[in-house]
Amino acid sequence: HLKWVRGLEEEMFRQGDAEKAAGLPVAPLCDRTTGGITKSQVGFFEVVVLPLLSNFVGRFPSAQPLLDGAAANLRYWQDTMHKQNSGAV
């Protein structure tokens, strides 16, 4: 999960760098100075991933490990945000 998030974040930062170099406003999540994707993960998991997977598991209970893994990822990002906000990272 982290490998993909870091790769995606770097791709988006490069897009923001290109926008900045062209004198354009930098798109949300593409600005290296504002935290990028790392800051958006908690909301993404809470608003998109967990509701989607919860409904999926409601229909296909054997997919529970998928939901459990997503919940663990959410806890990771919550902990990461807490550490960033407290200056521990």
Image: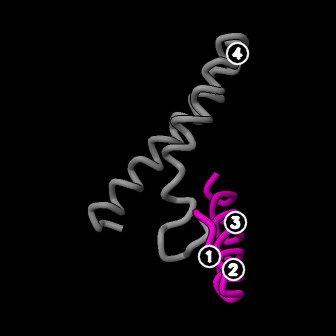
Q: Which residue is mark 4?
A: 62
Residue displayed at 60% across by 27% down? 67
Amino acid type for the residue under numbered disc 1: Pro
Mark sitting earlier along the chain (4/3)? 3
Quarter residue 65 falls in: top right
Instruction: Answer whether labels 2 and 1 touch (C-beta < 8 Å).
Output: yes
Residue displayed at 66% across by 60% down? 3
Residue displayed at 65% across by 26% down? 53
Q: Nearer the viewer, mark 3 or mark 2?
A: 2
Q: Which residue is mark 1?
A: 25
Amino acid type for the residue under numbered disc 2: Glu
Mark sitting earlier along the chain (3/2)? 3
Find out whether residue 16 is within the magenta segment. yes
Task: Tell me which segment is drawn in magenta.
Answer: 1-28
Find out whether residue 71 is within the magenta segment. no
Amino acid type for the residue under numbered disc 3: Gly
- Which of the two residues, 39 or 25, is positioned nearer the viewer here? 25
User: How many angstroms separate mark 3 from mark 2 (CA)?
Assistant: 19 Å
Q: Position of residue 6 (x, y in %)?
A: 63, 64
User: How many angstroms separate mark 4 from mark 2 (CA)?
Assistant: 45 Å
Q: Which residue is mark 3?
A: 7
User: How many angstroms separate mark 1 from mark 4 (CA)?
Assistant: 46 Å
Mark sitting earlier along the chain (4/2)? 2
